[in-house]
Image (cartoon, rainbow, N blue to C red):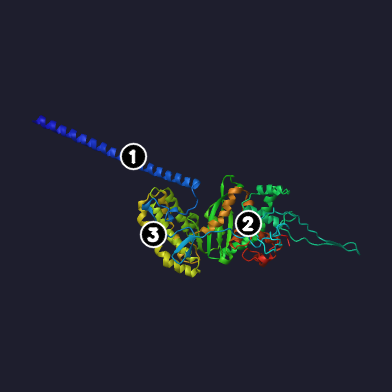
Amino acid sequence: MKEKSQKELKNKNEMQSLIESLQEKLSLQSKENEAHKSKIQNQQRLINDLYEKIKLQSHRQYGKSSEKQITDHPQASLFDEAQLPDDREALEVEEETITVPEHERKVAKKKGRKPLPESLPRVKREYDLSDAEKTCGCGCTLTCIGETISEQLDYIPAKVQVIQHARKKYACQGCKETIKEAKLPKQPITKGIASPGLLSFVCVSKFEDYLPLYRQEKIFRRIGVDIPRASLSNWVIRCGELLKPLYDCMRDQLIEYDVASADETTVQVLNEPGRKAENKSYMWLFSGGPPESLSYLYHYAPSRSHEIADNFLMGFKGYLHCDGYVAYDSLAKKRDITLAACWYHVRRKFVEAQKVSQTPGLAAEAIKMIRKLSKIEAKAKKLKPKGIENLRNKEARPILKKLKIWLDDNTARVLPQCALGKAFSYTLNQWPKLQTYLEDGRLYFDNNHSERAIKPFVMGRKNWLFSNSIAGAESAAVIYSVIETCKAHKIPVYDYLRHVYAKLPAVESIEQLESLLPYKVDQSKFISSNGD
């Protein structure tokens, strides 16, 4: 009996030991399974992230660059009834209404060829019938009753001429000692062969038409004039130096106003002391000033540090439109500056998420709400600042409240690292700045005006690729600033540059200088094309 009891106890101990061993193995296996599960989830997230990046890159390279949503059209999802949009208002075709007695219908307007400008000179070529054709079959002579005129546009290659500056000399025939010579007006480039007209053409070709200097060199050679690229480059640098006082005046007015915008893009400078040629530098763009004297100012800098914006905007107080770059947050903490974020940056992130997401419903819903805000801005364009402010607070503020609740409710449903999750995160992080535009009717709903102004630089960079020196980059910044400010005020760029290049060397006072600013210049005094 005792042996049986010991045996049972032994079996029980062995069973307990086996159970504990199995439990330990099960626990270990469970931990391994959890580790494998976590690893698989991480790998799946990485796969999804890479999938989205590849798909988005494919869209950028091969797809349409426009962010216009095809689903905005009521027939876009004709064969996908489950995703038909509720908003049927966004039709791209301009329509007009034609009323007939029985019914009313809408048809698309037909856009014909625009008439040629009346300001262009006309060369009239007349075509007449022969004498034989002027005789009717009945024997009578035909009488001219009018003419039919059709117009054809012709092109005459650029005209190049040499301006001779003849300075009269006078001598005293009495004492034979006095000789006087008429003074030559101050020139934009002392002892240079480039006239204000030629300098204007070179600058407009490079900075507005994106034509690199080496191509301009070939064009000049083709018409029989040999101008080395080095000379063209030196002229551009000198033009930037000449326009710098105007640039400084525009910057002073930008600082004095309380609404400004900022953006930046990369530029490559080959010969920069202490840096490799492949290092990235930056071209910043600041815009601001009262509407009647709005200025766009480019600024070259070797970095994207917040100190660049801090130094340029020294003395500025007020609202600053910008993107989500952290340098602007650092600037706002140091200064009396309130940041206003761009709603189109938000929209762009949801558009990208919609392109790569396998379930784009949330992205489409966000885009739809942002579209409603955009429609309010379309109505606001016709109002003055106070009216804009009232309209936004009445119509846009409720939509923003609804959007914020929607973002908070759905942010937990998306993975943080996916494109949609990043769009949610960006919007929520920028939310206080995205509401700033409600505070003042002068503020913009987006920062598109800055992006449009910086686009010419980006387009030019695709052609001339890089700047050779810091002096070249700084001159480019000044010239781009003047050109974009002229375009903002609808000033003909070539005529303006031709005028100021001729007048700036003789400027002696701040009043004379300010009279040459793009938004103050008297266009009636522009130098005509024949140099008079």
**What is the residue that sits farthest to the left in this orientation?**
1
Mark 3 secondary-structure assignment: helix
Q: How many numbered badges does the structure rendering display? A: 3
Residue 414: x %, y % from top left: 37, 51
Mark pair 3, 1: CA separation? 37 Å
Disc 1 target residue: 36
Give the residue type that dot 2 points to: Ile
Which residue is more in the foreground, 129 or 87? 129
Query: What residue is disc 3 on?
Result: 404
Q: Could you tell me how far apart the alpha carbons at marks 3 and 2 are, in whole angstroms?
A: 43 Å
Q: Residues within 10 Å of mark 3 (few under 14, many from 20)?
A: some
- 29 to 69, vertically: above or below: above
**Residue 301 visible in rendering:** no
Coordinates of residue 379 in the picture (x, y in percent): 47, 65
Numbered tag placed on residue 519 in the rendering: none
Disc 3 or disc 1, which is closer to the eye? Answer: 3
Query: Residue 105's quadrant in the figure?
Result: bottom left
The front one of 134 and 28 is 134
Amino acid type shown at disc 3: Lys
Residue at (56, 58) in percent of width and height = 112
Q: Which quarter of the picture shows residue 55?
A: top left
